Image (cartoon, rainbow, N blue to C red):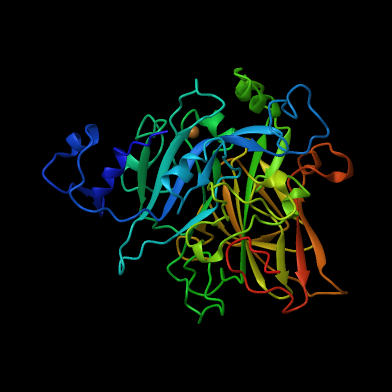
């Protein structure tokens, strides 16, 4: 496939304080409508994503005939998806090779809060690789950063109000992250379908306060709290999504699902179901995980599967939480399933320090954070929580369950309580777990 890049030249657009300045002599409208030769070298994007289709694995039992497992799925996979991939650092050929190799949930990525003292925008380049199994569905894709305050709508990703990226094209989104916290992102084209099919994941913004070790020793925070109250030693993204097997089957078999019949057969945590949620992360290149988890890739650019789990090749994100007794652990929850969920951490109180990328503070600064064992999290909502790992007892590690209070969503009706939104928190004696090298790192 030949990748044309007319949109990438838009990178020459410079944004400053809401005003738009176009480099060169062309008018704004002319530049929108016509691809123009770049007159200034654009800065490289911080992250490169690709949109395409692919296959993931969900437990084959209980089967949902004829929809699950999908007979078209190549072994060992079960379920057709649309999704994103992180193609940062790949050659053009390697990137093209990722068609039909999407992952779910989408690559976890993060940006730093915009620093007026060192102004730099955050740029994400999106390539639309097309859908290998559905070439008739020549849908565009976009990147919509949910809840994010764009300077102008141009980069919003809602396709009727901003640009979309047709098959075979490339476009670079420019962001100026001013509000720290946890967000989610998704493709906004045919969004009920594309989001549900898997084009969604978690993104967060690190606060300017990061690096200040006088408020909390690690120098890592969820917000600019001024007092260390959102400081943490470890952080874990917990992205909630769902799979309605019939709709995924229908997209694979050139059928039209009736979305008003929606039901979710699987409830996913970081794109997997328990106990796969506690399987390892895919091998991560820590040194390259600057703005996203850099999963190791093979010579073709394809993802290297988590150790011992070839079926999870396209579900690289683990949800297992390892920590040492006494440490503060940050959990970043976001839900882009279509139902409200109730995530419970049995035996450990969580403190909600942020909601929807907003710190829990009143207008006068009053602390409105609160402790709870359960967070009710609606579609499109995010929660930032911090808990203190309790004292360690016995040998090995102590296990606490983090699970959906609705048991049908924690076990997918599978025997043994397996198959849904559940994971484990393992508390070790102090020093038992090494410091984290990247978010969701096990440290062991
Ligand atoms: Cu899309």
Q: Residue at x 48, y 37 (%)?
A: 187
- Residue farthest toward the bottom in the current orientation of the protein: 214
Q: Is residue 211 left or right of residue 39?
A: right
Q: Nearer the viewer, residue 313 or 158?
A: 313
Q: Residue at x 72, y 36 (%)?
A: 266
Q: Is residue 31 left or right of residue 173?
A: left
Say which quadrant the N terminus sits in: top left
Q: Nearer the viewer, residue 68 or 426?
A: 68
Instruction: Report which quarter residue 373 is drawn in.
Output: bottom right
Q: Residue at x 49, y 57 (%)?
A: 110
State the image coordinates of residue 108 (x, y, percent, origin top left): 55, 52
State the image coordinates of residue 101 (x, y, percent, origin top left): 57, 39
- Residue farthest toward the left in the current orientation of the protein: 25
Is 2 located above or below residue 384 in the figure? above
Is 2 located above or below residue 222 in the figure? above
Whether residue 367 can be seen here? no
Instruction: Report which quarter residue 436 is drawn in.
Output: bottom right
State the image coordinates of residue 255 (x, y, percent, origin top left): 61, 17
Instruction: Report which quarter residue 389 is drawn in.
Output: bottom right
Is 146 located above or below residue 158 in the figure? below
Q: Nearer the viewer, residue 209 or 175?
A: 175
């Amino acid at each position: 496939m030949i990748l044309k890049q007319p949109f990438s030249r838009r990178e020459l657009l410079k944004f400053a304080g809401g005003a738009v300045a176009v480099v060169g002599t062309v008018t704004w409208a002319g530049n929108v409508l016509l691809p123009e030769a770049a007159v200034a070298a654009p800065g490289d994007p911080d992250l490169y994503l690709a949109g395409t289709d692919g296959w993931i694995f969900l437990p084959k039992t209980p089967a949902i005939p004829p929809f699950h497992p999908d007979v078209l799925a190549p072994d060992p996979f079960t379920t057709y998806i649309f999704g994103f991939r992180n193609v940062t650092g790949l050659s053009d050929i390697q990137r093209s090779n990722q068609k039909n190799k999407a992952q779910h949930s989408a690559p976890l990525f993060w940006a730093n809060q915009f620093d007026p003292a060192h102004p730099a925008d955050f740029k994400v380049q999106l390539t639309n690789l097309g859908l290998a199994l559905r070439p008739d569905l020549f849908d565009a894709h976009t990147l919509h950063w949910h809840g994010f305050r764009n300077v102008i709508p141009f980069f919003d990703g809602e396709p009727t109000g901003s640009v979309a990226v047709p098959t075979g094209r490339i476009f670079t989104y420019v962001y100026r992250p001013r509000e720290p916290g946890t967000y989610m992102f998704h493709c906004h084209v045919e969004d009920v379908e594309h989001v549900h099919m898997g084009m969604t994941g978690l993104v967060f913004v690190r606060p300017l306060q990061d690096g200040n070790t006088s408020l909390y020793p690690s120098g890592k925070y969820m917000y600019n709290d001024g007092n260390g109250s959102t400081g943490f030693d470890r952080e874990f993204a917990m992205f909630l999504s769902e799979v309605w097997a019939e709709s995924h089957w229908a997209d694979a078999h050139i059928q039209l699902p009736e979305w008003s019949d929606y039901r979710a057969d699987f409830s996913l945590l970081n794109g997997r179901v328990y106990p796969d949620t506690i399987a390892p992360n895919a091998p991560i290149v820590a040194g390259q995980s600057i703005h996203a988890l850099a999963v190791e890739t093979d010579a073709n650019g394809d993802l290297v599967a988590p150790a011992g789990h070839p079926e999870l090749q396209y579900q690289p994100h683990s949800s297992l939480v390892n920590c040492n007794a006494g440490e503060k652990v940050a959990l970043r929850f976001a839900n882009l399933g279509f139902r409200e969920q109730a995530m419970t951490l049995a035996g450990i109180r969580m403190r909600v320090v942020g909601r929807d990328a907003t710190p829990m503070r009143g207008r006068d600064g009053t602390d409105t954070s609160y402790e709870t064992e359960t967070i009710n999290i609606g579609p499109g909502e995010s929660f930032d929580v911090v808990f203190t790992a309790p004292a360690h007892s016995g040998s090995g590690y102590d296990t606490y369950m983090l699970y959906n209070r609705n048991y049908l969503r924690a076990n997918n009706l599978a025997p043994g309580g397996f198959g849904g939104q559940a994971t484990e928190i393992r508390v070790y004696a102090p020093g038992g777990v090494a410091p984290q090298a990247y978010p969701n790192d096990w440290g062991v």
